[in-house]
Image (spheres, helix red, strand yellow):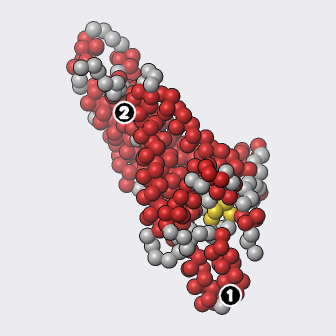
Amino acid sequence: PYSTERINTESSSGKILSRLIRLLCYGCIVIGLVLVGVKHPYIGRRFLIMVPTLFVISVIAFTIIQLPPGNFIDSKILQAELTNDQTAITIAKQLRELFPLDKPIVIQYVRWLGLPWFLSFKQSDQGLLQGHMGFSMQNRQPINTVVGDRILLTFLISLGSVLFTWAVALPIGIYSAVRQYSVGDYLFTLLGFIGMCVPSFLLAILIMYWSNVYFGISMSGLFSSEYATQPEWTWGKVTDLMQHIWMPVIVLGVTGTASMIRVMRGNLLDELKKPYVITAMAKGVRPFKLLLKYPVRIALNPFISGIGTLFPQLVSGGAIVAMVLSLPTVGPMMLEALMTEDMYLAGSMLMVLSLLGVFGTLVSDLLLMWLDPRIRMEGGVR
């Protein structure tokens, strides 16, 4: 039997994830209130807008998950009755007592957010606002425990893909713009079009095949067999992760790199033709200094503005790649939760992706304000 006592246990990674979510939620509110009346009220307004934005997203996500008829427990009971599995029927009935699926949707939503905790301060009433994402019906464990390491690995792969994209796309895009219509420009253009046309999952399959045939190396997974089942993190496990993580980073970063090369090239070509560049060159400003100080800085806007959608796209769009490479990331788990109607797991994953998107958009806005003074919205005096 699955008692509440067993279902309330959380691993160390789950507790860390809970604290991190709680810190992000409360931190943005506190910082937003502080910045409203100080030097940059625009930043304070952006922080305050995040609160109703996340609230609306949570309502939409929870409603969409509730739309399909039936639920996880009813499906399990039906399958158990068809196979005459009495043990599965008993477990499903115990789950019905633990999860308030028979309550009105408003009560389920309020409990999912954790609003009753502010009145009772009981651990059993904790929800998203306290960093507790609920319980998975499929695994019958706290979601923080189930996805703790997966979120960490997903974040590392996404961050590595972003750094790979910037490290490759920036210099190639600058070179293609400065050496327009040269042999190198044509070569990088051809490679860029190939990178945009080849699907990520197909590239993953090809790399796995070539590494196995020509080098005899299996490139699936993020860990070797000796570390795959090891729950605690050691220096050996970290080193083993670094030896395997480069492949999904490259696979997920190739498509974005190819498109960003074209964007960087086009934007920089537009800037190089503007009068201020011609005037600075006529005054004797060194070409390399002029290039980096003004045109490149302004042409970076698409890179910065894309941060808000980059992390959610890498997580959701990399689900197929994760299944091909057998990666223990969030994408396959969220897909499975949606298919099995594990509403708390699916809803919590959608909220995590939305939180990443909202914070990413905020970070990109702040970086754009610093990078390009024309974008600052200080509001002049009339």
Farthest residue, direction top: 283
**Which residue was labeled with disc 2?**
301
**1, above or below 148, in the image:** below
Residue located at (41% from left, 27% from top):
41
- Residue 85 numbered mark, or none: 1
Residue 380 lies in what quarter of the image?
top left
Residue 36 in picture, x, y percent from top left: 45, 28
Quarter the N terminus occupies: bottom right
Q: Which amino acid does label 1 sit on?
A: Asp
Residue 207 in picture, x, y percent from top left: 54, 56
Residue 45 lies in what quarter of the image?
top left
Farthest residue, direction left: 275
Assess whether mark 1 and mark 2 are in contact (beta carbons under 8 angstroms): no
In this view, the residue in front, 181 or 295, is 295
Please indicate, yes or no, whether residue 307 appears anywhere in the rendered image: no
Please tell me how many numbered marks the rendered image carries: 2
Quarter the C terminus occupies: top left
Q: How crowded is mark 1: few (under 14 residues within 10 Å), some or many (20 or more)?
A: few
Residue located at (63% from left, 75% from top):
96
Q: Residues within 10 Å of mark 2 (few under 14, many from 20)?
A: some
In this view, the residue in front, 302 or 325, is 302
Q: What residue type is labelled 2?
A: Asn
Farthest residue, direction front: 119
In this view, the residue in front, 86 or 198, is 86
**107, above or below 168, in the image:** below
Q: Quick one: SS at disc 2?
A: helix
Residue 40 in picture, x, y percent from top left: 42, 24
Residue located at (44% from left, 31% from top):
44
Distance from disc 2 to disc 1, alpha carbons, whole Å, reads: 59 Å
- Residue 216 numbered mark, or none: none
Q: Quick one: SS at disc 1?
A: loop
